[in-house]
Image: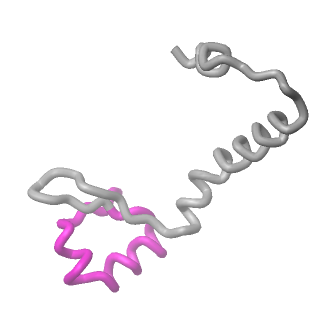
Amino acid sequence: MLDIRPISDLRNNFTSIEEAVLNKGPVILTKNGYGSMVVMSLKEYELLTNHIEKALDEAEKQAKSTTKRLSHEEVFGQFK
C-alpha cells in the first residue's frame, strides 16, 4: 500500500518518514493535494539506477575501443 503524506510531514515528522522509508519503502509527499516528490532509501535508489550506471560504463568502454559512432536514430530508433 502506498504511503502518501503531506510535505509538511517531512519537516514535522522526519523520523517517522525515515522509519517508513527504511522499513516499508518509498513515501510519496504531496503539496496542496498533488504529488510533489518521492522519498526513498539510498539502497532502493541504487537498485533502481544500478543498471543505468552499468550500461553507461559499458558504453564508455565501447566508445574508447572504437572510433565508430552511432546516430541518435540508430541508438533510440527502436524505442518509438
Q: Is residue 28 above or below residue 66?
A: below
Residue at (34%, 64%) from the top-left corner? Answer: 27
Q: Is residue 14 above or below residue 80?
A: below
Residue 61 part of the magenta-drawn span: no
Residue at (72%, 20%) from the top-left corner? Answer: 70
Q: Which residues are magenta?
A: 1-27
Residue at (25%, 62%) from the top-left corner? Answer: 29
Q: Tell which of 46 and 65 is nearer to you.
A: 65
Relative horizontal placement of residue 71, taking residue 62 as reference (left or right) = left
Relative horizontal placement of residue 64, taking residue 37 as reference (left or right) = right
Residue at (24%, 55%) from the top-left corner? Answer: 36
Q: Could you tell me residue 33's position as x and y percent?
A: 11, 55
Relative horizontal placement of residue 62, taking residue 79 as reference (left or right) = right
Q: Quadrant of residue 16?
A: bottom left
Relative horizontal placement of residue 66, taking residue 27 as reference (left or right) = right
Residue 25 part of the magenta-drawn span: yes
**Colour scheme in use:** one colour
Q: Quadrant of residue 4?
A: bottom left
